[in-house]
Amino acid sequence: MSDAGFIDTFTVAIEGFSAFERQALASFFRLAARRSPAFRQVDEPGMADFLIADADHAASVAAVRRGQRVEDTVFIGAAAPEGAAAWLPRPIDPVHVMRALDELVELRLSAPEPPSAMMDLDPMEVDTLRGGLDDLPQRRAEPPAPAAEAAPEPAPAPAASRPRGGGGREVLLVEDSPIARQFLKQRLQHLGYRVIECASGEAALDLLSRRTFEMVFLDVVLGPPGSIDGLQLCQRLKQRGAQRAGLRTVVVMVTGLDGATDRVRGSLAGCDAYLTKPLHESEFIATLLQVDPAFEWQADTATAA
């Protein structure tokens, strides 16, 4: 339900809450209308891309369930219903609400196309869309033709012609949001990397004191105020690399902070790439091609073509 012509604008409806809380949320959406992705409030929940619901208001939770929108809803309150993708405790923090919505957008944009959407594509187009990865969902086969009319099976493409992506190399992912961490982990795995996870800057520093990684993916905001954030972690990684000959760690920031000042801060911290959420596949692959010399994607795809 994104607005036509504005691919990064999504609509949000508010279910429940006190008049003061509703007004506060509505004001925040108006102030954040120029960010990307942008969110515009609508009054009709059935016409909204996402919902924000009062988890402490039984009628609101019931309405979300009746509309089968639990997976599209940010619940705020003491506890979220089973199946909820996003939950936040009170008091309402508009920044955390926006971050949860960003993650829901990212999950939606990353959802694989249903098999019917690929039925009109030739095999080369399907392989291109799927990136040549065997572990992604496959199209359902058509019923076999009678033996007398069956066409000969095409020879399978040689293994060397398929994109190898990360080639099974280990990378470190540091992200405090379980939703965002799982999303990015799956995406990196699909691109051929093995992923080691950390949920905080402190845990990452402890791990990095014992081992090294050629590539690290960091969120900027990691935990509550006072925690080690992604910028500090990036600085320490780059300082360590400068002190030890031959040690270079590529740092890719993946964050919802998309302002010009945020990008400058990332650059000053020493990051090799700065990506913002929602993360688009083409931009992500292009970045990996730039920062990871061993990432084999475009060359192998061209060979297969």
Image: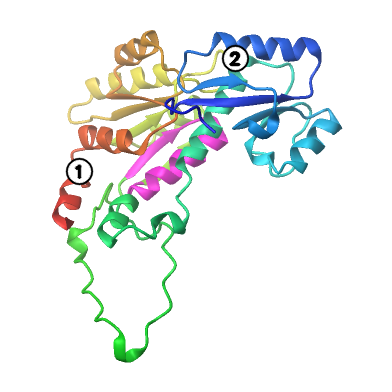
Q: Which residues are magenta?
A: 170-193
Residue 178 part of the magenta-drawn span: yes
- Label 2 secondary element: helix
Mark 2–mark 1 distance (CA, rounded to whole Å): 42 Å
- Left/right of residue 70 with respect to residue 263 in the rendered view: right
Q: What residue lies at 63% left-to-right and 36% top-to-bottom?
A: 72
- Quadrant into which the N terminus falls: top right
What amino acid is at disc 2?
Answer: Phe
Residue corresponding to mark 1: 294
Percent position of residue 193, x then y: 34, 47
Percent position of residue 70, x then y: 69, 40
Query: In the picture, residue 218 is in which quadrant?
Result: top left
* Residue 196 seen in this snapshot: yes
Percent position of residue 9, x then y: 49, 24
Label placed on residue 29 = 2
Residue 122 part of the magenta-drawn span: no
Count of residue discs: 2
Q: Residue furthest bottom?
A: 148
- Label 1 secondary element: loop
Label placed on residue 266 = none
Query: In the picture, residue 141 is in which quadrant?
Result: bottom left
